[in-house]
Image (spheres, grey):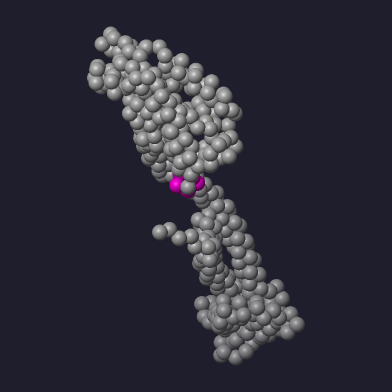
């Protein structure tokens, strides 16, 4: 048994797919951002290390003459000039005996911000040491401590640009993903709508439209082929059911509605007061029909019954409804009658309809009359009372008529 759960709404496939796409893109882009950031920082560190090494080599050549001529003032001035350019934060020049010869350090109020200092300490945890040479002999040593303000600024700018690019790429990826997913979601929605309509309304004429995605297109075509077979099967089943219903509700010999159809219709008629007020019932019995069967056989009797049915249909037209109740018993429900006189007039016309002789297949002909009993719908309130009255009137007429030979 299928159960409908309404305690918690189920998420749609579209919403679920969108969430998965967003989470996947965010995780992927975050990993890419981390990898690119780490790679960028290490690359910048190598660049800064190489740059400081080149700076120390250049400064050491500038200080070579001050060590040779023991010019401390010139060494201080050279270090200050280069330091103010932001190449380093502090410098110490040692002589050949490792004694301090000159030094320079950045003023405290010009010191870099704590974040830049942290970056510089990570990039250059130890001062750079560079030997000062003269005539291929070491005459001193230069120790530089980095002030990597340019590198740190470039680092943060690079990370900001990288972050912006990752965010932009994420938005583009989400837009592309949504566009691609929309095709999948639309295809699934089309299929589910058709399936739901077929299941709920038995609308086997629905078809899945063509899809852009090849797999869904082929699935839709196969599903449409299945619907074609189901529609054809339903059409045959409906035709078979209609045929079975007609067989169940119609007499196979005469084609008239049978007793089952009569009982259904008369019950509906008597349950509707407005319809009952303008209707009447005729019971008809063929007089001396057994004599025709005994004289010319049942085939001749069948011919007579078929002709009786034809004349009843011709008499009824589209206004009244004839029935074969069984054997040689028939009934007609009269509609649109309002008085007993009108019913009697129709009974007389009906007898005239059956006065001509009946042609048999053996070339002979015979005559046969009908005994007709009627009951007025507006005089009765139950089916049993109406049927009983019509039946008693029919047998009353039948017993009053003179007997004829075939």
Quadrant of the image containing the C terminus: top left
Residue 235 sits above or below residue 315 on the image: below
Residue at the location (46% across, 32% down)?
390
With 303 as the anchor, is 267 left or right in this view?
right
Q: Position of residue 141 (x, y in %)?
A: 57, 83
Q: Is residue 195 magenta?
A: yes
Count of all numbered marks drawn on residues in the image: 0
Residue at the location (53% across, 54% down)?
14
Residue at the location (40% across, 21% down)?
401
The image quadrant that residue 324 belongs to is: top left
**Viewer-closest of 40 and 51:** 40
Label the magenta part by its dominant secondary structure.
helix
Residue 193 sits above or below residue 43 on the image: above
**Viewer-closest of 289 and 359:** 289
**In this rendering, does residue 25 appear at all?**
no
**Viewer-closest of 179 and 192:** 192
The image quadrant that residue 143 belongs to is: bottom right
Q: Position of residue 107 (x, y in %)?
A: 73, 83
Q: Tell me which segment is drawn in magenta.
A: 192-199
With 125 as the anchor, is 324 left or right in this view?
left
Which residue is most to the top?
Answer: 363
Q: Position of residue 223 (x, y in %)?
A: 40, 42
**In this rendering, does residue 328 appear at all?**
yes
Residue 386 sits above or below residue 181 on the image: above
Q: Position of residue 140 (x, y in %)?
A: 57, 84
Quadrant of the image containing the N terminus: bottom left
Residue at the location (57% across, 79% down)?
122
Q: Is residue 404 magenta?
A: no
The image quadrant that residue 273 belongs to is: top right
With 223 as the anchor, is 178 left or right in this view?
right
């Amino acid at each position: 048994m299928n159960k409908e759960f309404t305690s918690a709404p189920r998420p749609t496939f579209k919403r679920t797919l969108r969430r998965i796409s967003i989470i996947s893109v965010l995780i992927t882009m975050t990993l890419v951002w981390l990898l690119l950031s780490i790679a960028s920082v290490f690359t910048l560190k190598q660049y800064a290390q190489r740059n400081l090494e080149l700076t120390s080599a250049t400064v050491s050549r500038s200080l070579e003459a001050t060590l040779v001529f023991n010019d401390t003032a010139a060494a201080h001035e050279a270090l200050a000039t280069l330091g103010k350019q932001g190449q380093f934060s502090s410098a110490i020049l040692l002589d050949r005996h490792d004694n301090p010869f000159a030094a320079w350090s950045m003023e405290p109020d010009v010191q870099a911000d704590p974040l830049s200092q942290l970056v510089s300490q990570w990039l250059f945890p130890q001062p750079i040491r560079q030997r000062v040479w003269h005539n291929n002999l070491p005459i001193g040593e230069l120790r530089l401590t980095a002030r990597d303000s340019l590198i740190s600024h470039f680092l943060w700018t690079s990370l900001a640009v990288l972050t912006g690019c990752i965010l932009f790429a994420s938005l583009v990826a989400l837009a592309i993903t949504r566009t691609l997913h929309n095709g999948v979601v639309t295809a699934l929605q089309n299929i589910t709508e058709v399936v739901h309509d077929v299941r709920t309304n038995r609308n086997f004429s629905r078809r899945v439209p063509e899809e852009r995605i090849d797999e869904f297109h082929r699935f839709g075509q196969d599903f449409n082929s299945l619907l074609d077979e189901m529609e054809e099967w339903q059409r045959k089943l409906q035709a078979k059911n209609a045929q079975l219903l007609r067989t169940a509700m119609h007499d196979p010999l005469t084609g008239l509605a049978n007793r089952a159809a009569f009982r259904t219709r008369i019950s509906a008629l008597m349950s509707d007061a407005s319809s009952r007020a303008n209707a009447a019932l005729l019971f008809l019995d063929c007089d001396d029909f057994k004599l025709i069967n005994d004289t010319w056989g049942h085939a001749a009797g069948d011919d007579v019954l078929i002709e009786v049915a034809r004349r009843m249909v011709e008499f009824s037209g589209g206004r009244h409804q004839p029935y074969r109740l069984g054997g040689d018993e028939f009934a007609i429900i009269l509609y649109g009658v309002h008085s007993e006189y009108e019913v009697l007039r129709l009974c007389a016309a009906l007898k005239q309809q059956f006065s001509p002789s009946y042609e048999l297949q053996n070339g002979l002909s015979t005559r046969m009359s009908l005994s007709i009993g009627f009951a007025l719908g507006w005089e009765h309130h139950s089916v049993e009372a109406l049927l009983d009255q019509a039946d008693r009137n029919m047998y009353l007429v039948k017993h009053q008529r003179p007997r004829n030979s075939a």
